[in-house]
Structures are given as C-alpha cells and as structure tokens.
Image: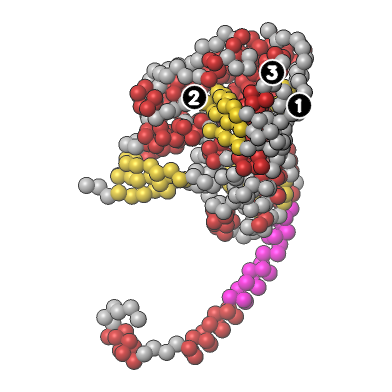
Amino acid sequence: MSYITKSPWVIHYDGSSCNGCDIEVLACLTPMYDVERFGIINTGNPKHADIFLVTGSVNEQNIPVIKQIYEQMPKPKVVVAIGICATSGGVFRECYNIMGGVDTVIPVDVYVPGCAARPEAIIDGVVKGLGVLAEKRARLPQELAEERAQRLAVSEADEAEAVITVEIPGDAKAAAEKGDGQNV
Amino acid sequence: MSKRTIIPFGPQHPVLPEPVHLDLVIEDERVVEAIPSIGYIHRGLEKLVEKREFTEMVYVIERICGICSFGHGWGYCKSVEGNMGIVVPDRAEFLRTIWHELSRMHSHLLWLGLLADGFGFESLFMHSWRLRETVLDIFEKTTGGRVIFSVCKLGGVRKDIDADGLKEIVKLLAGMKAEIKELTDVFLEDYSVKNRLVGVGVLSRDEAAELCTVGPMARASGLRQDIRLDGHGAYAKLAFEPAVEEDGDCHARCKVRVRELFQSIDLITQCAESMPDGEISVPVKGSPSGEFVARMEQPRGEAYYYSIGNGSKFLERMRVRTPTNMNIPAMVKTLQGCDLADVPMLILTIDPCISCTER
C-alpha cells in the first residue's frame, strides 16, 4: 500500500449530465470497484474535498454553483472533468442552453473521455489527478507567498491612495464625531 | 405562533446525485410549504431535431437520461416507426422487451440503494449496488455498454442474443432471485427501516388520481395504471399483472418497486422461453411525414413521445414528457406538513430523475 501516499476526498457535482456518468462515479464507490478501501471518500462538503469531479457540461444556471463549489475548496485542489460532455459538450454541444465544457468556467486538470465514462476510466482519472495534486502541493508555499506579497502591495497602494482622496465634508465629520449613528 | 424559516435544499445535496433546488418553508420542525425550482440540467435537446437527422436523433434521445436510456431510445423509435408505418420484427420486439426489463431492474436496484443511503443504512446501499452490477454485466456482455448502449435503432435492434446467451441470462437472473429476496426483505421487514417508511408521506387514491401521478407512485396508491398493459413490444404475449399496493405511503412505494424487480425477472424468463426466430431489424426507407404519439412504461412511470415529420430528414418537432414531471406535484403535496427529517425520504420515493424532467 506504500504507493498510495494520499487518500483524496472527492466531491461530485452534476453539471447538466444525463446521469450516465453520475451513476458510474457512484459505481466506483460501491463493492464492484470499491475505491473506499483506499480511503477515497465521496463527501458532500466542498471544504473537505481535494478533488472536484464534474460530470456534464455547463449551462447558464449552474455556472454560479460550479464556481462556488470550486472557490470553497481548500488549496491545493484538482478538477477532473468526467465524460465527453464535461470535456467539450459532447452530443449536446449544439444545444442552445449548453455553453461547452467545464473548462469554460473553471480550470480543469484532468479530462476523462467516454459516454458514459467507465468506472475504470474515472478511477484512472482520479489517480492522474493525484499526481497533479502532488505537484500543486509542492508549488503551494511559493504561490501563497506570492499571493501574500501581492495582497500587501495592493493594500499599501490602497492606503496611499486613501490618504489623498478621502475628504469628509465638515458637517458630516462633525455628525460622525458626535456619534449619532448617521450613515455618512 | 412559531417563526417561519426557509431552508434551501440543493442544488448540490448529498442525498441526490442530481441538482434540484427546493425552498422548504419550516415552522419549527414541520415543513409548511415546499417550492421546487428547476433548470440546472436543462440542455434543450428537443430542439436538436432541427440539426440531427431523424435516424441520428436516437443517440441524442437515449442521452435524455442515463438510467432509463434504453426506454427513451425505444420510445423515440416507437414514435417514429409509428409515424412511418414500419412494422418491427417480432424477435426485435422481444429483445427490446428483455433490455427494457433489465433496465427496470437496474433502475430499481439503484433506487433501493439511494433510498437506503437516504435513511442512513450504508451497507444496504452497498448491497443493492453490488447486485446491480450483475445486471450491468449482462448489458455489457450483450451490447458492449454499461449504462448507455445504443442498441435500439429505427426498424429493430442492432445486436442479437443467441440461444446460449438467453439461457445464461435466465440462469444469472434465477441465481440473483435469492440474493434480491435477502436484500429486499430488509427493506420490507426490518423494524428500523419500517420506522422510517410506514405511514410517511401518505398519498390517498383520490389524491394520486387528481394529481395525475404515474408509475410506481400511482400503483402504490391503489391505481391500476401501467402502460405495459396496452401490449406494446412483447407484452401482449406475456402473462403480466401490474404490482398494485393500497397504502400510498413510502413503504408501499418501496413494496411496488420490490415486486416489480421479481416481475421483471419473470418477464425476461418468459421472453427467453418464447423468443421467436427471424430477423432483428427491417430497413428504413423514406422520411417521416405524419404525426404519432407513443407511450412507454419507464421504470419511473408513463413517458410520452410525440413526433411530427414534414417529409424531410429532419423532424418538425419532437416532444417528450417524462414521468418525474408528472410526479412532482404529488411530491410537493406530500412534503406539506411532513417532518424536516423525512424530506429526503419523500423526495426519493418518487424516484426523481431531474435529467429526464429538464432535458
């Protein structure tokens, strides 16, 4: 078992899939394929998840849902697009309500083809995702440091700007000092 | 007067693999009102008839839903075949019936698993899905696909099952019977399971008729309604009586589906025994120009397929009405006045297929 160093927790969201890939994702967890024996758990909470499995393509209404789930997941995170619909839109590509694959909304790391994707292919995709996860984890400290530096730079610039631009009118300032709760 | 709160349910919720959103208006622990909102899986595939030829459209219609995929394909074929006056060979109708009943078994086993997961009986969920894999193996062996297998085409079917194959299927299913019995006895007899299901979400016979419920939902409330009774496919030549229960609660809905599991095994065995010889498909010539309505009994209830042609390779319009669409009003009705903890049970016992509903 030493070759598995990480048991990822996955979260699954059905974009506009036909259920075919969704039931295959669930089939991975059940006794025939049983990935739970490696500690891989399907969680309902984005904040517990490492890998985001998206089935089906994207439409106008589920864009905010997919974005929210993605943003709530802690770093490092990996997105696996399952099935041809999540990859490119597949057979529904020309439908009026289909915007295309999941990569039109969030960055995708692994694509699993198939209609419906077979459980073996999905498991393979998740294993490939583990590699990406390890790479991202290695890069994470540097990324966080860069982000922090950027944030600091932005807030410093904001402060400098604030000193110059904020001018409070005399009477409003007096009201605020009096503290009568008026919204200035 | 207690305070009213609104709890959002979904679209991403652990109980259902599919996104549906409900606003549950709660007074203490009691649900006063449930307001469903849908549209997360709408693709607009009916409009694809303008871009895909009627022979290619089968592939799109099959992907309305991955669970009752075969039934959708058959329904569409039936509608266009009726439109063009094509007579499908008997052997093809028998083969279609076998795959359709296998789909019903796989759908009901899947549903039993989700129900068990809904009331927190994880090992029962695993066992249901383990049994389901046997059915998927039969699909894979006979068609090559596990969930979407595109074996139905206009004028017949693509693949044949030989006599040995049929014998093997019958043998496998006979072996499954004891295992299914062991599994379903837990659903029907176990004290703690009954505690969650008996008397929950009662829908009376009159309400079921008034709200136009279909399929197992209607049959659990005492309505003898099953489209297979009209004798399409091979059903006219098979001995068959729909499973009807009187109680109208979650337990009755479970019982109907359990009885249908055994009924499907029986129907497939009958089909295999009386399988006629002959062709499995006839060539399709020309283009559809009339209009036709076909009805199918899907695992979830009556589905309706309307097609109108204009003499060209592209249909003028294709319309599908799916069973979940008809059962949502009944679901909303049973949700009113239920306990908050029973909400997943009530949503699951209509066996919702959002993908079918929104297309």
Q: Which residue is mark 3?
A: B87
The image shows residue B105 at horizontal and vertical percentages of 59, 23
Name the residue rendered at 66%, 12% in the picture: B271
Which SS class for mark 2?
Answer: helix
Q: Amino acid at mark 3?
A: Val
- N-terminal of the pair, mark 2 or mark 1, is 2
Residue A119 appears at what percent x and percent y? 70, 37
Q: Quadrant of the N terminus of chain A?
A: top right
Label for residue B285? 1
Nearer mark to the viewer, of 2 and 1 = 1
Query: Where does label 2 land, which residue?
Result: B215
Q: Are marks 2 and 1 on the same chain?
A: yes
| Subunit that carries the residue with mark 1 | B
Q: Which quarter of the picture shows residue B133?
A: top right
Crowdedness near tag 3: few (<14), some (14–19) or many (≥20) residues, C-alpha within 10 Å: few
Q: Is residue A19 above or below residue A53?
A: above
Q: Residue at x 71, y 31 (%)?
A: B287
- Residue B312 seen in render: yes
The magenta span reads A130-151
